[in-house]
Amino acid sequence: MTTVNSTMTKKTAVLGFGNPVRADDGVGIYVIDELKKQIGEVENVSLFDMGTSAFEVLFQLKGHDRIILVDAVVNTGEPVGTAYKLPASAVEAEIEDDPLVFLHSLKWSQALSYAKKMLGDAYPEDIVVYLIAIDSTKFNVGMTEEAKVGGNKVVELLLQELKA
């Protein structure tokens, strides 16, 4: 088990998006599962599976100083498993004002839009998004090894961020 600095001053929520029965789309959930295995329960770090109960989780973000989101991204032109970290300006540009959502297919940008409205003044300014390139979201339980490699890259990056 990896040790994480439990005295970190920022309470951090890490949200993994995706659908584990849609092939590589489940990579965000995979990252959350791997973090749970490696760090377990840590003070000031909350790990959330955003796969099926996204709106319930958004209410639990109150009191967090930082939000980190992990999701899959299709059609990047890069190899499956390529990991991206979005700059704050790109994150803000993606947030929609009032997105139309389906309860079981909430995207990270939509989640931030609703979190912003629900949390009001408690909405944190420190937001990071990691995206992992994928090719397929067809019905399939399980991911490709390439997507897992990308997920593992993001796990390592998150472990470094959480130790800092």
Image (tube, grey):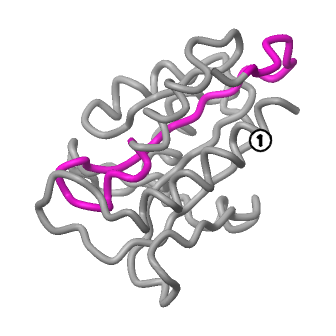
Q: Position of residue 144 (x, y in %)?
A: 32, 64
Q: Quadrant of residue 100?
A: bottom left
- Residue pictured at 33% horizontal, 77% vertical: 135
Q: Position of residue 6 (x, y in %)?
A: 79, 12
Please state which of residues 120 and 152 is positioned toward the viewer in this rendering.
152
- Work out whether 130 lies above or below 35: below
The residue at the far bottom in this view is 77
- Work out whether 73 lies above or below 157: below
Query: Which kind of residue does numbered mark 1 sit on?
Result: Asp
Give the magenta part as a residue range. 3-29
Does the magenta run of residues contain 113? no
- Work out whether 2 lies above or below 42: below
- Residue pictured at 11% horizontal, 61% vertical: 139
Does the magenta run of residues contain 15? yes
- Residue pictured at 61% horizontal, 29% vertical: 13
- Identify the residue under disc 1: 126
Please state which of residues 51 and 34 is positioned toward the viewer in this rendering.
34
Q: Position of residue 46 (x, y in %)?
A: 58, 21
- Work out whether 158 lies above or below 131: above
Q: Is residue 103 left or right of residue 82?
A: left
Q: Is residue 40 left or right of residue 66?
A: left
Q: Is residue 39 left or right of residue 96?
A: right
- Residue pictured at 69% horizontal, 27% vertical: 12
